[in-house]
């Protein structure tokens, strides 16, 4: 254990604070990431990358800052942006999942072509994994691709494709070797969303908005060089992406800023003339959740250290998605409970607080408990891969 | 001794379940919800024909003269189909207020209209329970001023019963001079509550000046029972929808219902809920027959059902996987109904605090 902040780190923190102080007027509001980045977001992203405050360890030749990994600096960055409540740069499935996947499994040409525009917010990605019949059992997917004249010809249907309606590209899983066992016949392909034959239909969710889509694919032609990794090795490649998605869903930075926002609610709102923070039931719940959030923050540091040393962290990594998404929902629950009836108000209602965004988040948090591998699947993974327990036996054949 | 619904109550249950299930397939729920009016005329008229709007109103005023437990049997059916009608405000709380505290003339004027479904009531008692954005209405001389929020079923109401402090309740027609009604939109689009602002409104006081404290208390108790019964119905349906879906949906070449993880989620949901059905029945019975037992059991029943509802709305959605999160299954209509019921007339935190006071564990 060495967490000493030497002078180098104190300088780094001071510089970062000065940077935020000087530039925060240029920062777009911390958004929900539900639209294509526009000039404002792109310019801010560029400024952050040039100063090494995001995409810090992505190599320079791909457009990143190219720094050596340094946990303390990562922590300092997270802390300062959270404290200042300033947008800390773009996130999303491209930066969060595709880029690490390309760094791990892509070829040189693919990295050069896609990483830079992705991290600068010029190419926005969506994830085409799930199908109506293939959710938890993703490997049973049936969207298929045959090869004709250096092209894949893709046919099938994807569902839950978040952001497909404004994405430029999609990383998609398709079955390319129908005769192989289910995990060995899948390829991971990057597909331009403007290709003819792609039809995107919005899917309205419980929030009332259409956060994701059904994507229908009819004879969609994609050049064969767009496969990441080898043909038929898509399952392995996809698992790199999933690993990053699940890490992303347990992001403590976002939860720390939620604690700040909830604290503001407790300090500003009154129940029976008394500030909510003085009612011990709300305060107590917030602090209990704060304990879990701080635990997750340092847990993430521990995982990061493992990654930097190329160690496999085992069960401690496997719990992150389940723990993080459960905690996120707990936090939005606390905000809603504290607001009482006012918490039930929604978009556009008189007296609504922050435009009903706590309700929206609370519902979306439930979505994220399901998306990216449900809690039940996570618990199976934790117990089977993490604790070495045997898999549930196959059902006996029944009629 | 017999603890359970009588044969008559079972018949009542059957006929209301048939009625609401026929009237409200998912497409119609969606259609009505989108209107955000809080009352569907067709269903309201059907409830009038079934004498439901007068369930608690004695025969002499044109009602059916039933007891609270009978009323809850109906409410549970309405909750099962997230029925878009102002039943809690108009058919439960308002009749209880009038019967408990009204003068004979007030009863004769309003109860027959309520039973006939011609006049719909909204009931404003929020600030008696707790205050946040609004201070409540106050009476000076014979004039009312102030505002009250989350007036139960106030959206489609023609007349309001509004508490002005703990001892007075006013009968205020929506069209009276000085009345401003503002719709409040919650996540539940099947019922519409509102804010009512009164400026120099001349008061017709329930039972006369300073005579409504008992009526206000009973109205709140009745409202809490009604919301709890509504949640009971809605939550139970969520459980059975989850069970049915799990039997149909296959992953890894088997029905997801065959996974113990999924079975246990369903088993936990029903286990959390069913004991509270019993407590709710007891509380409803106590409301009519054992007044000393009523208050505490109502507080425990609503807070307990609200907590079970919170667990069930989430878990039933999880069993449905991504489908539960979409609008396609419409599961969210039940989810939202349960959420809003929980917050109205006292969140569980507030109810438990009241329960401590009611039992003398804590000074008021
Ligand atoms: C908000 C959100 C965003 C999403 N974004 C994307 C996206 O961008 N791209 C994409 O491709 N997909 C996306 N998804 C899809 C998501 O990955 C799937 O919904 C998820 O994997 C679950 O699959 P399913 O919905 O088919 O549920 P099912 O697999 O049908 O699961 C239904 C229930 O059965 C349980 N279950 C299934 N198998 C087992 C088992 N073996 N043991 C125990 N329990 C089991 C589940 O836990 C769940 O409770 C998103 C989903 C949501 C909700
Ligand atoms: C305080 C006490 C008093 C008892 N009194 C009596 C008595 O008076 N008479 C008598 O005959 N017995 C008695 N028992 C025994 C009791 O019935 C058994 O302990 C019980 O049935 C569990 O069996 P087991 O101990 O063999 O555990 P196991 O069956 O080996 O179970 C071990 C664990 O595996 C889980 N498990 C097992 N099968 C499944 C499954 N299919 N699905 C999911 N999980 C499963 C269990 O839940 C448990 O967590 C008593 C036990 C206790 C603890």
Image (cartoon, coloured by chain):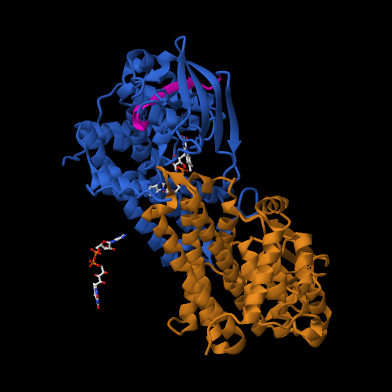
Chain colours: A blue, B orange
* Nearer-the-camera pick, A337 or B254: B254
Instruction: Look at 52% across and 24% down and name the residue there.
Output: A155
Magenta range = A181-194
**B159 in relation to A47, above or below:** below
Q: Residue furthest top?
A: A149
**A260 in relation to A113, above or below:** below
* Nearer-the-camera pick, A364 or A228: A228
Residue A322 visible in rendering: yes
Q: Where is residue B290 in the image (x, y as percent from the top left)?
A: 57, 89
A3 inside magenta stretch: no
Instruction: Look at 57% across and 85% down and name the residue there.
Output: B286
Residue A289 found in image quarter? bottom left
* Nearer-the-camera pick, B114 or B239: B239
A182 inside magenta stretch: yes
**A349 in relation to A79, above or below:** below
Q: Where is residue A203 in the image (x, y as percent from the top left)?
A: 58, 38
Residue B174 found in image quarter? bottom right
Left or right of B191 on screen, residue B239: left
Q: Residue furthest front?
A: A399
Q: Quadrant of the N terminus of chain A?
A: top left
């Amino acid at each position: 254990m060495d967490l000493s902040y030497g002078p180098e780190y104190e300088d780094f923190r001071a510089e970062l604070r000065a940077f935020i102080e000087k530039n925060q007027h240029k920062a777009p509001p911390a958004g929900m990431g539900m639209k294509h980045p526009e000039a404002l977001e792109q310019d801010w992203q560029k400024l952050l990358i040039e100063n090494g405050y995001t995409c810090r360890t992505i190599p320079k030749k791909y457009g990143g800052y190219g720094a050596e990994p340094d946990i303390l600096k990562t922590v300092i960055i997270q802390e300062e942006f959270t404290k200042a409540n300033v947008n800390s740069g773009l996130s999303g499935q491209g930066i969060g999942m595709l880029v690490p996947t390309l760094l791990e499994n892509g070829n040189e040409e693919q990295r050069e072509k896609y990483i830079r525009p992705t991290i600068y917010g010029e190419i926005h990605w969506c994830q085409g994994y799930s199908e109506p019949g293939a959710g938890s059992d993703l490997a049973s997917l049936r969207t298929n691709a045959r090869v004709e004249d250096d092209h894949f010809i893709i046919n099938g249907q994807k569902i839950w494709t978040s952001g497909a309606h404004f994405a430029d590209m999609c990383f998609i899983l398709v079955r390319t070797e129908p005769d192989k066992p289910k995990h060995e016949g899948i390829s991971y392909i990057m597909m331009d969303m403007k290709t003819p034959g792609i039809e995107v239909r919005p899917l309205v969710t419980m929030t009332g908005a259409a956060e994701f889509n059904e994507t229908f694919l009819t004879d969609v032609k994609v050049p064969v060089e767009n496969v990441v990794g080898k043909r038929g090795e898509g399952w392995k490649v996809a698992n790199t992406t999933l690993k990053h998605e699940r890490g992303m869903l347990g992001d403590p930075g976002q939860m720390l800023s939620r604690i700040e926002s909830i604290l503001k609610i407790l300090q500003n709102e009154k129940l029976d003339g008394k500030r909510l923070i003085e009612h011990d039931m709300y305060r107590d719940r917030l602090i209990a959740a704060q304990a879990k959030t701080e635990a997750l923050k340092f847990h993430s540091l521990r995982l990061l250290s493992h990654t930097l040393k190329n160690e496999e962290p085992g069960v401690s990594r496997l719990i992150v998605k389940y723990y993080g998404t459960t905690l996120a929902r707990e936090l939005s629950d606390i905000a809603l409970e504290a607001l009482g009836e006012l918490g039930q108000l929604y978009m556009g209602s008189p007296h609504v607080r922050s435009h009903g965004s706590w309700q929206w988040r609370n519902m979306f948090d439930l979505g994220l408990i399901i998306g990216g591998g449900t809690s039940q699947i996570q618990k199976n993974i934790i117990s089977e891969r993490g604790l070495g327990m045997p898999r549930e036996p196959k059902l006996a054949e029944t009629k | 001794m017999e603890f359970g619904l009588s044969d008559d109550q079972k018949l009542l249950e059957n006929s209301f379940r048939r009625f609401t299930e026929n009237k409200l397939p998912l497409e119609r729920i969606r259609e009505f919800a989108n209107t955000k009016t809080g009352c569907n005329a067709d269903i309201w008229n059907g409830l009038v024909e079934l004498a439901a709007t007068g369930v608690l109103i004695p025969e002499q005023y044109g009602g059916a003269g039933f007891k609270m437990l009978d009323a809850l049997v109906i409410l549970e059916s309405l909750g099962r189909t997230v029925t878009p009608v102002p039943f809690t405000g108009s058919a439960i709380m308002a009749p209880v207020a009038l019967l408990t505290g009204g003068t004979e003339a007030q009863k004769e004027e309003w109860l027959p209209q309520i039973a006939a479904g011609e006049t719909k009531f909204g009931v404003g008692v929020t600030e008696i329970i707790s205050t946040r954005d609004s201070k409540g209405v106050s009476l000076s001389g014979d004039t009312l001023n102030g505002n009250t929020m989350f007036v139960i079923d106030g959206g489609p109401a023609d007349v309001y019963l509004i508490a002005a402090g703990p001892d007075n309740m006013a009968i205020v027609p929506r069209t009276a001079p000085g009345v401003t009604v503002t719709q409040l939109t919650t996540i539940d689009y099947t019922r519409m509550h509102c804010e009512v602002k009164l400026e120099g409104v001349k008061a017709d006081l329930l039972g006369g000046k300073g005579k409504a404290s008992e009526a206000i208390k009973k109205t709140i108790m009745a409202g809490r029972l009604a919301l709890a019964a509504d949640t009971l119905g809605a939550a139970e349906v969520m459980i059975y929808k989850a069970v049915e879906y799990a039997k149909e949906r296959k992953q890894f070449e088997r029905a997801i219902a065959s996974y113990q993880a999924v079975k246990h989620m369903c088993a936990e949901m029903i286990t959390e809920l069913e004991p509270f059905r019993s407590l709710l029945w007891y509380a409803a019975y106590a409301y009519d027959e054992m007044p000393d037992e009523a208050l505490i059991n109502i507080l425990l029943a609503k807070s307990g059902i609200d907590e079970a509802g919170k667990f069930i709305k989430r878990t039933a959605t999880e069993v449905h996987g991504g489908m539960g999160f979409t609008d396609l299954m419409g599961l969210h209509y039940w989810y939202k109904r349960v959420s809003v019921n929980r917050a109205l007339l006292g969140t569980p935190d507030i109810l438990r605090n009241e329960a401590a006071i009611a039992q003398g564990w804590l000074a008021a």
